[in-house]
Amino acid sequence: MRMYDLILKKKKGEELTTEEIRYMVSGFTDGTIPDYQMSAMTMAICFRGMSRKETVDLTLAMRDSGDVLDLTGIRGVKVDKHSTGGVGDKTSLALTPIVAALGVPVAKMSGRGLGHTGGTIDKLECFPGFTTGISEEMFLENVNRIGIAIAGQTANLAPADKKLYALRDVTGTVDQLSLIASSIMSKKLASGSDAIVLDVKTGNGAFMKKMEDAVALAEAMVSIGTMAGKKTYAVITDMDQPLGLAVGNSLEVMEALELLKGGGPEDFKQVVFALGSLMLMAAGRAADEAEAVSLMEGVIADGSALRKFAEFIEAQGGDPAYVYDVSLLPLAADTVPVIAEADGYVHRILAEEIGTACMALGGGRETKESAIDLSVGILLKKKNGDAVRAGETLAVIYGNDAAKEEAARRKILNAYQIGWEKREKGPVIHRYIR
C-alpha cells in the first residue's frame, strides 16, 4: 500500500477503505508518511469530500492512534459534553456540578483556550491551588467518590488528531466538515464516556457562522458517535451575541457561580438546562425534558449543586472558600464604561468583536505560549432587543492597562449595532439533533 496511490484515489473522488484510512493515519502518526503527502490528501478531501463511512473510519483510526481511557471502574453511565466554542461560553462550569449532584458521573477531559478567552481549565485556575494535572487513579477515584473530575487532555489522547490539526491549520484545510467532525469526535471517543452531548454554536461568534453549516456538523458528529456505539445528541445554540453577560475568565466563573446560587442570565440558564436535560436522559436519570429541568432546578434550589462544585474544587487542590465568596476571585482594578452614543434598540452584538476585545485586554491567547490575565474581562449591560439611550452604559471593561482598555472600548462600541426600530430577541436554542 502506498500513500501516493491513496492520494490519487481520493483525487478521483473514490472512497477509501477502512484499511487504507488506518494505514494513512498510522503512517502519518509515526512519521513514515510525510507532511507533504498528508497535505495533498487533506486538500483532496476538501475538494472531493468523504462519505459517512470514511468519516467514521477516520475518526476511529485517530481515536486508536493513542490512549483510549478505560472508565469501566466508574459506577453508572458516564456522559461527556463538548462545545464547539464561543464568546462567554462558561457552560461546563455550571453544568457539570448540576449533573453530578443528580448522581450522574462526570469524568471530563478539557483543554485550555486559544483565542477569545481561556478554556475550562484556565477558568478553573481562578481558584488558587486548583490543578487538572491529576493521576488517572485520582481522576477515577474522585469521580467515584464525589461524582466529578476534570483533567487536562493527556499528550497521548488522539495524537493523530493533534498532528493533523497542526498541518490543516497551516495548509488552508481546516474548514472541511468531515475533518472537523472527526477531529472533535476522535477526542470525545478516546475519553471513554458512554454518551456524548454536543453544544454546536452558530452565529457571528461561532466557528460555524451559518445555521446550515452548524446543522451539517452536528448531524455528522451525531452520526459518528452513533455508529461508534455511543448515545450521541447535539443542540444547536445561538452565538450571534455572547452567552450571558460575562466575558473573561474570572467574570465567567462568577456568572457560573451565580447560576448555581439560583440567579444568572436567562440565555445562559437555557443552554445549561438544554444540555443538562440531554445528559440526564442519556444516563437514564430523567424520563423527559420536563423531569430533567425539575431535577436541575431542585439541586440548585437546595444548594447541593453549589456544594458539589465546592467539593470538586477542593478535591483537585483548590480553595473552596472562593466558591462561596466570589469577592475573593481575581478582578482587575480598572473599570471603564462603554457609553452609548445614540438612542435606539440593540439589534445585534457582534460576538466575535467582543471576544477579540477581551483578548486585547489580555483575557485570551493569541498563541499557545501567551499568558492569560484571569482578572480582566467585559461585563455586558445591554443585550439584543434592549432599549438604549445615549449616555447609558453598554458594557463595563475590567482591565489593568489604559492603552488596552481604550482599544477594547473601541472594539466593543463597534460591536454594538443599534437601530431605531424595536426587534424581538431571537431564540437561544435553535434545534436538537438526535
Image (cartoon, helix red, strand yellow):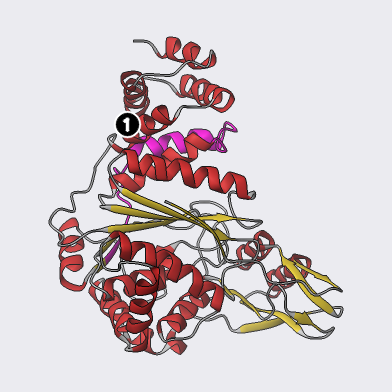
**Residue 124 is at least partly visible in this image:** no
Position in image of residue 270 (x %, y %): 50, 72
Task: Name the amino acid type tagged 1.
Answer: Ala
Tell whether 355 sits left or right of 66.
right
What quarter of the picture does the N terminus occupy?
top left
The question of residue 154 being in magenta is answered with yes
Q: Nearer the viewer, residue 239 or 33?
A: 239
> Where is residue 133 drawn, in percent x and y?
28, 60
Q: Quadrant of residue 362?
A: bottom right
Question: Does 124 appear above or below 4?
Answer: below
Q: Is residue 217 magenta?
A: no
* Vertical position of residue 352 compared to residue 391: above or below: above
Instruction: Provide the residue span drawn in magenta.
Output: 149-176
Q: In what element is the residue under mark 1? A: helix
- The residue at 35%/45% (across/down) is 187
Q: Please name the residue shown 61% across and 63% down the image.
A: 359
Residue hosting label 1: 61
Q: Residues within 10 Å of mark 1 (few under 14, many from 20)?
A: many
Looking at the image, residue 389 sits to the left or right of residue 434; the answer is right
Q: Is residue 281 visible?
A: yes
Choose top left, top right, bottom left or bottom right for residue 352.
bottom right
